[in-house]
Image (cartoon, rainbow, N blue to C red):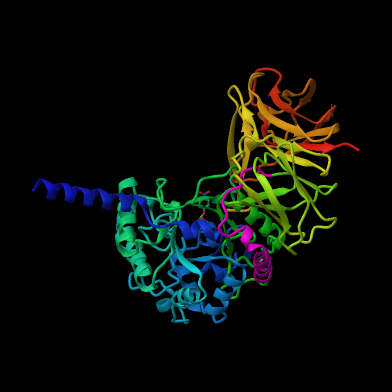
Amino acid sequence: MKLLRLVASMALVLAARTAAGGPDTQWFRDAKFGIFMHWGLYSQLGNEWNGKSYYGSGEWLMNRAKIPADQYARIAEAFNPTNFHAEEWARLVKDSGARYLVITAKHHEGFAMFGSKASPFNIVDATPYHHDPMKDLASACRRDGLRFGFYYSQFLDWHEPNGGGNTWDFRKQAKNYQTYYADKSIPQIKELLSNYGPLDIIWFDMPGGLNRDETLAFMEDVRRLQPGCLISSRVGHDLGDFRDFGDSELPPHTTDGPWEALFTHNDSWGYARNDLDFKTPREIVRLLASIAARGGNLILNVGPDGTGRIPELSQRYLRDVGQWLRLYGDSIYGTTQSPMPDQPWGVATLKTNRLYLHVFERPRNGLLIVPQFEAAPLSATLVANGQKLPAARNGEDLTVTLPPELPDNRDTVVAVDFKGSLPDAWNTAPEIISRQFDSIMVDAAKARVTGRATISSITSSRYFGNWKHDVCAQNMRAPGDHAEFSCRFLEPGDYRIALEYACPSADKAREGGIEIGGQSLAFETLLTGEATAHDPLLFVRHNIGIVTVHAPETISVSIHPKNDGAELFRLRRLIFEPCN
Ligand code: JFZ
């Protein structure tokens, strides 16, 4: 009897552990690159309504133009995506080198892009298309060996009186969110988890209306149907199987996974006819490498239009990224975070005993310095053509000699095989300042702060919904509140020092100083403008002065206010320019 009870309680403990442990995330950690698609009725509008163009997040048009729900619903009557071909979409994702696709099954507008018994407001029942594109897409992705997931807006639903967010048609006080969850959200999520084969991700967004316990119960509903399906952190209350950063947010530090940074290809998530501000293949490749260096994934969004056509530039640039990944994919897929912070020449990724150097800028003398390289180098190889490069330990550095021209102007990859291990020096390595580059930027996120000074991210937006995140050194109000940087100058000479900061009128004309070695520079802050969440945060580049460095050495650079008073500024970065 006692034994039985013991066995029973052990079984309980085991069961609890599996539940708490959650599904296996290894595929996700290894994937590094995913494609996001925002597709819905808003795709038909393309960010235009009643002859007026809107700029920014097109999938928010219903909310921005306060379109009445019944009028908005009539867009479905003309929604007929005859250019949608699941195999072509899946093939494009495959060709981009991405390993997974997440698509909006229902966004905040409330329209289901899949056949649903839970609500007639869906693509099969409410459009002339009369067909479920998600069925085709799920199987096309699976055929191509891609992981597949649905985005589902679990709380915001502007079509429903009880859904979150629509207060222009429906009174907020009259809303019953529990009714919304019970009648539409949960039934539709169950449909998605039951009718489309095994899902790899369910990507929730913009949580609301549930407390922590209710969210856990909500997650249990998902687990019961598909225990292997990963749940995004935007399910709410810091829960979920992987973490999503803010939109267009590149975390400044390495972060233990699994996590994802999300960016959209232009300035909108949903299709916007007037938005041609696309990131180039080179920008995407560098973003991907920089995120991998921090230990995470990039999920990059594209917005197909209402006919099912993916913008031409998105198609072309994604294929270019895929072409780069076919050559250099080993330096991205399955890698882990870099042992060193971003370097003036680029970033690094790691795969057990191989360090991949992602070279964005060639040092003028061709000598690439890999700092704090405490392992024994075995070889350095240019991945593009297999050419061996001279590589030698030089004190604590590894020096790799690059060819006169970099073979890939997007990101030239050098693979360094080594024996031993590379300790994590991301937070301890000094910033390298070198005359081999035109200018060197040191982000404020790398500062050590003293006194009341803090480092934190400021969120602001460009166009509507086009969020930006600037990590700044802040709250420097007294002479003891410092932002300090440890800078290792590789060569002696004169260096111009500039600061990049935002300064609202309350902080205007504050006096500050920079101490560097035995030298000091004085300055008075320049006005940039007020900081509000819905406007861009403006930064000024302020040249402070020139210092002379007499020998290669590591020097502390310290910035502080001269007197007590208002905040000095919001410091985003320090810039060094060798003077010629
Ligand atoms: C949400 C949506 O509202 C938007 O339309 C789009 O789908 C995007 C991917 O996600 O917007 C958010 C959600 C969370 C943050 C910012 C924008 N956030 O946490 O910074």
In the depicted view, which residue is nearer to us: 311 or 552?
A: 552
Q: Does the magenta stretch include residue 138?
A: no
In the depicted view, which residue is nearer to us: 320 or 48?
A: 320
**Spot occupied by residue 315 in the image (x, y as percentages of width and height):** 65, 71
Residue depicted at 66% across the width and 59% down the height: 284
Which residues make up the magenta segment? 314-342
Query: In the picture shown, does residue 563 fall above or below 318?
Result: above
Residue depicted at 25% across the width and 48% down the height: 13
Residue depicted at 65% across the width and 40% down the height: 374
Q: Residue furthest right?
A: 580
**Spot occupied by residue 306 in the image (x, y as percentages of width and height):** 56, 73
Residue depicted at 36% across the width and 64% down the height: 189
Q: Does the magenta stretch include residue 324?
A: yes
Q: In which quarter of the image is residue 386?
A: bottom right
**Spot occupied by residue 62 in the image (x, y as percentages of width and height):** 51, 62
Characterize the magenta stretch by its predominant secondary structure: helix
Query: In the picture shown, does residue 313 fall above or below 486?
Result: below
In the depicted view, which residue is nearer to us: 176 or 390?
A: 390
**Spot occupied by residue 241 in the image (x, y as percentages of width and height):** 42, 53
**Residue 55 seen in the current view:** no
